[in-house]
Amino acid sequence: GAVVSQHPSRVICKSGTSVKIECRSLDFQATTMFWYRQFPKQSLMLMATSNEGSKATYEQGVEKDKFLINHASLTLSTLTVTSAHPEDSSFYICSARVSGLAGGMEETQYFGPGTRLLVL
Amino acid sequence: GQNIDQPTEMTATEGAIVQINCTYQTSGFNGLFWYQQHAGEAPTFLSYNVLDGLEEKGRFSSFLSRSKGYSYLLLKELQMKDSASYLCAVMDSNYQLIWGAGTKLIIKP
């Protein structure tokens, strides 16, 4: 299946600093990538949809100035958590949409391994 | 509104069979996905159904009935490593994934 990488896997930072998370599709081109966050024992929460070459679409309640998303190429999207605070501590997961695969699995999303962020 | 329902937790015995149900009400339908998520890890893709019927893939099978808004994931010959959360997700008319809360599956020896 399609491979998505995410870096870093884990980051600890001080309150007020910014953290950048990278999401890469390794063996395919992804015109659309998604950013999720997941709190312990809860389901995935979509934060934003990232389209290559255009502005990201943010879900209601997600601050676009705090969670900066850049999708500069077909294989890379970045999420920057600006001025991070302890309440931003969470598990951030990206996924990439694979379209047009044989077998009818169009629009399948494949996930990166996730980034665990801890803000002190 | 859009809604995905699945049991919160299930317990099964190693070697047995378990069926995890998922019912949905969404604005439009462009397929139903099942993902497996081990604790502390990201989800991994298991199956995709867009037409009614059963899709079999090794020990895992997924069934869909669009008229009933219903799907199930069937796991056979359960192994301890199958202990995980199983997430049901439906792709709506905007190609957005609507997620269920997940079913935590506990496998006992």
Image (spheres, helix red, strand yellow):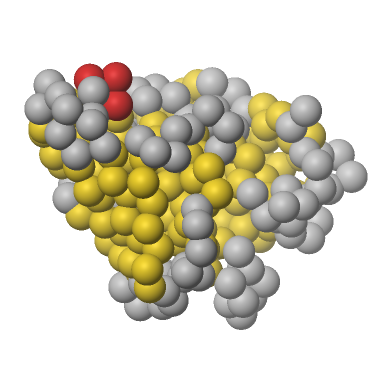
Q: Quadrant of residue B81?
A: top left
Residue ID at (17%, 50%): A8
Residue A71, relative to residue B75: is it above or below?
below
In the image, A86: left or right of A94?
left
Check the image and name the residue furthest to the right: B67
Please provide percent x and percent y for residue A81. Answer: 28, 39
Q: Is residue B53 visible?
A: no
Q: Quadrant of the N terminus of chain A?
A: bottom left
How many numbered circles are shown?
Answer: 0
Q: Quadrant of the C terminus of chain A?
A: top left
Residue A75, relative to residue A90: is it above or below?
below
Please provide percent x and percent y for residue A85. Answer: 23, 23
In the image, A37: left or right of B17?
left
Residue A56, relative to residue A103: is it above or below?
above
Residue ID at (61%, 46%): B97
**Depth check: B59 or A28 in front?**
A28
Q: Quadrant of residue B5?
A: top right
**Depth check: B21 or A74 in front?**
A74
**Depth check: A26 or A61 in front?**
A61
**Depth check: B65 or A82 in front?**
A82
Please provide percent x and percent y for residue A27. Answer: 35, 77
Q: Is residue A5 visible?
A: yes
Please provide percent x and percent y for residue A35. Answer: 43, 47
Residue ID at (64%, 49%): B96
Residue ID at (81%, 48%): B28
